[in-house]
Structures are given as structure tokens and as C-alpha cells.
Image (cartoon, rainbow, N blue to C red):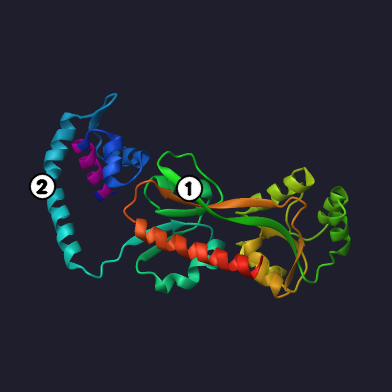
Amino acid sequence: MRWNLEWLRTFKAIYETGTLSAAAQELFISQPGVSLHLNSLEAYTGYKLFDRAARKMVPTEKGKILYNFLLEPLKKLETGEQHFHKRSKEERATISVGMCFETFQYTLEEHINELPFNLIIKFGEYPQMQQDLDNGLLDLIVSPQKGNQQNLQYQPFSKERIVLIAGNQTKTADIEALLHSGHTTKAAKLLKQQLWYSTAADMEHLKNFWLKHFGEHPDFSPNYIVPNISSIIRCLSDSTGFSVVPDFLCRDAILSGKIKLVWEGSNPLENTLYFGTRKKTIYEREIAQLETLFKAKWELTEKLFP
């Protein structure tokens, strides 16, 4: 294991500003991210580098020695960075974005080669994305969930509706009749006897849909667990079975007749989608461009599928 240059940059910022919050502002990362870098550096060196006072980070003797040792090398690196930054007209920013795989496919995949900056996409669970955003590992997340980190802000931009779908070869007449006539208990009993598709990452859709519309937890396991929602759509196309998915991901397949919309619910289950960003970032222009692409895609979808 070697020490990380970002740990040293963070150490220098804490030393010169005197507080974790001021260092975080200077580096455009979260205060927990600053603490993480400092803790990692102290663990690596084996020395306590600051005494934590109420309003001040006071460098220890080891901290002073390390600062004096690093000051000139870091200044040279910063000078070199500025020099080459000015001379490199083609330099591209690198933006890291967290979202679910299907959202990437639906919105950004077709625009990748048009972007004037580098893009790194990370898939995963939303709580982890929020933590990575707060720690400076991501610059933007697209999420139906809002975290409570003070360094982050969330902007709503659209909604997704969670709907019940089936393959076009599925016999749904009896179930649809029960659902639309309000006999949800009988419909739920019939639905439990059907073939079901889900994903390991999105069991929440099924659970929340079942709780809202049937008033209970789903007490059955899906028959097929596939990698993602796109796989569900492909498996159901021109076949049999049921699933619960966000409406924007299945609209094309419904329009083409490969699957059918069985039920949205008398009071549909909807999630607000948010852009999550840090309150301070050096990538405002790039993030704004990505957000514009998302909004344009959703506006087009709403026109085609009102």
C-alpha cells in the first residue's frame, strides 16, 4: 500500500486552513471526505498529525515535520499542473456519474460520443452512490432517493410510475377484470400463482407496489431473477409472465405489442427522480449539460407517451 496524493493535498489544505470544513470548501469535497483522507494518511504513517480542538486543527510535531517536508514538492506539482493546464487546449474534464444501469441505457448511452468531456458511469445501490457523491468520488447521481448529507443538494426533474406488466402471451383477462373492479384481494391471490420476473437489485419495486395496492408484503419469491430490468423486458417479450417495473423502461415494448400493461393501480405508485450534486463543484458546466440531456429525453418520452 502506498500513500495517495489526494491524502497529501488534503493534509496540506487542513494545515493551511486550520479546519476540516475550510479544507473541504477549498478542495470542493465533503467534510467526511476530508476526514477520510486524513484518517487514511494517519493510519498509513502511524502518527497522529493533528490534535482535534473545538474550532481548530492543531498540527502535532509529526504533522509540522510532514508539512515542511511536503510543502515544496506539492508546490512544484501544483505549478506543473497549472503550466500544463494552460498549454493543453484539448484537456478534457472527467465527470463521474452514478445511476442505475437501465437509466444509463435509456438516457445517456446514445449521447456518449457527443460529450466534450470524459465520463465514468458507476452502477450500484443508491445509498452507496450518495456516500460516494458526498466523498467526492462521484460528481452527479440520478436517484429516486434523497440522502440527508448536508453537503449535497437534490433537484427533482421527473417522475417514474411503477406498473404491472405481462408478456403478450399471458392470459390476463380474469386478473385485469378483478383489478379494475376493485377486487384486489382475489386478484392478488391469482397473481401469486403466476410466473414472475425480478432483479436482485430492484426487489423494492415489487415490495412497494404490493404494499401500496394490496396492503401486504409479497409473500412469494419470483421465479426468475435476471441481471436487470432490460432483461426482464426482453424475457417477457412475446412470452408469458409478470413483473413490476418503472413505466419509462417498458413503454417502447408496450407500444410495439411485445408486452402489455396490466395495471397502474387506482392510485399509481410514483417516484420522484432527482439529480444529486455537491453544493460546491468545479464541474457545473459539465453537470448542467448532462442534466439537459436527461430532461430532453424525459420531455420527449412524455410527448410520445402522454
Please, what secondary structure does the residue beneath circle 2 have?
helix
Circle 2 Cα neighbour tier, 10 Å, few/some/many (<14 / 14–19 / ≥20): few
Provide residue 153's location: percent of width, then percent of height.
Answer: 44, 45
Residue 12 sits inside the magenta stretch: yes
First to last magenta residue range: 6-16
Image position of 165 (left or right of 45): right
Q: Is residue 188 magenta?
A: no
Q: Main secondary structure of the magenta part?
A: helix
Residues 91 and 66: in front is: 91
Above/below status of 291 relative to 280: below
Which quarter shows the C terminus?
Answer: bottom right
Secondary element under disc 1, as helix, strand or loop, is strand
Q: Position of residue 144 (x, y in %)?
A: 56, 51
User: In the shown orientation, is residue 159 left or right of residue 289?
Assistant: right
Using the image, tell me which numbered label, if any, was put on residue 154: 1
97 versus 26 height, above or below: below
**What residue did someone put label 2 on?**
72
